Amino acid sequence: MAEYRAYVTDAPGGNVEYRSVQISDENGNVMLKPLLTGICGTDRGIARGALPFAYNPSGYNFLVVGHESMCKVIESKSDYFKPGDIVVPIVRRPGDCPNCLIGRPDNCSDGNKHEAGITGLHGFMREMFMEQDFNLIKIKDKELGDLGVLTEPMKNVVKAFEVIERVSTRSIYQNNLSTMEGKTALIVGTGCEAFLYSFLSVDYGFDTFISNRHPIGQTSLNMCKQFGVNFIDSSKEPDFPQKPLDLLIDTSGDPGTVLRYLRKMNYNGIVILFGTNGKAPSTELTGEDIDHIVERNITIAGSVDAAKIHYMKALDYLSKWNRMHGDIMKTIITAYFSPGETDVFTKKPDGEIKSVIKWQ
Ligand code: DN4
Ligand code: BGC
Ligand code: ZN
């Protein structure tokens, strides 16, 4: 039985506190201490009791939260890791369905997987923990620094673009030079996931827009400028877009906003639903909306989580963007907090893109 301090909740009731916990011996051959842990929309959903699918690990009346993490190896009985290595632990752990058994628990077909810090498995916001080596991704690029904590949110983006590539083959999606140039992508939301989506969208060659229903801070605007992303304040630009959208990625989870832009989709357009907000107000889907989706062969796909390969590819993208846009890229981490601070789970700091807890 190990005792240490951790951020915990009693899932799915809401409320996160920092306190001592006792956790019985964990299966693992690598001992880790977190360096940084990120806070995302999912953590805030858990903290306000808005994620009914969150639950405590069996035998516990609490759940250690936190699934975005960059850790240092303290002790290792693994051939693959040594003390001092910097690693990112994987969030989702397989059940026994066919997708889980082939290393794709992100596509779990019966829901019997677990997610660290979310569903039935303690997460990473604690002073130390044990992990099995096969659940760890090594960060080899020493230049990446604190940006390594974005590996976890970025892996979701890499997987979603894999989905986009797959579904786009149902027709010719590229232009007549076989690129995405001239194609338009809109990413709804201006949080960390939205920015990471927009950077990859630019890499793919889309004319890329990111939107919110209010203005955004100077750091976010600088980031847009550096990466070639266009910001749209939808409260001031009700007629956007003038040209139909080829790709819509929603990180807001707001049905009304999704529908507003779904009505602007081009022929063979692709819509990725990614944001979740079970408490968002409902909206009305009309017969005309269904006609529009059918007549234009529009594909609407949900995308959740990602597999180990996507974490590895995520690191490559982050390294590339850090080399290309280092000083600006680093400003994506907008605030650092200390262990014990809990307000950040309930109140989004002004101008936030990514808030992190710095453990050491
Ligand atoms: P976040 O930073 O809370 O991002 C949500 C963004 O959506 C914020 O910029 C919101 O702005 C914005 N937003 C909310 N409502 C609207 C609206 N009506 N119109 C335009 N923008 C709006 O969270 P995140 O970037 O960490 O994650 C984004 C979402 O994806 C969350 O819902 C997560 O739960 C979900 N998620 C899913 C997966 C997965 O499927 C992984 C990670 C996260 P404001 O309200 O702050 O002004 O695997
Ligand atoms: C995590 C995913 C997880 C999802 C569950 C996200 O914040 O990044 O790995 O599957 O939450 O909704
Ligand atoms: Zn997350």
Image (tube, rainbow, N blue to C red):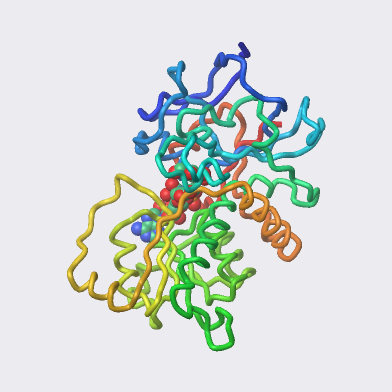
Q: Can residue 123 be seen in this view?
A: yes
> In the displayed structure, does residue 6 sit left or right of residue 268?
right
Q: Residue sitting at 47 percent across and 34 percent down?
A: 118
Location of residue 328 by image quarter: bottom right
Q: Residue furthest left?
A: 287
Residue 9 falls in image quadrant: top left
Q: Position of residue 181 (x, y in %)?
A: 56, 81
Q: Which of 342 and 242 is in front in this view?
A: 242
In the image, 241: left or right of 94?
left
Q: Which residue lies furthest to the bottom in this view?
A: 176
Question: Which of 297 and 149 lies nearest the eye of the viewer?
Answer: 297
Between residue 203 and residue 308, name the one nearer to us: 308
Q: Is residue 348 visible?
A: no
Position of the C terminus by quadrant: top right
Task: Please tell me which residue is depicted at 51% across the width and 41% down the height of the picture.
Answer: 100
Q: In this view, does 141 lie above or below 236?
A: above
Horizontally, residue 309 falls left or right of residue 198, namely: right
Tell me where residue 122 appears, x and y as whole percent: 53, 27
What residue appears at the point 41 percent right and 28 percent down from the top-left corner?
55
Q: Quarter-wise, where is residue 77 in the image? A: top right
Q: Position of residue 346 (x, y in %)?
A: 43, 37
Identified at 53% across, 39% down, the residue is: 92
Position of the N terminus by quadrant: top right
Q: In this view, does 199 lie above or below 180?
A: above
Which x, y percent locates residue 74?
Answer: 77, 27
Q: Which residue lies furthest to the top in this view?
A: 1
Q: Which of 15 and 237 is in front in this view?
A: 15
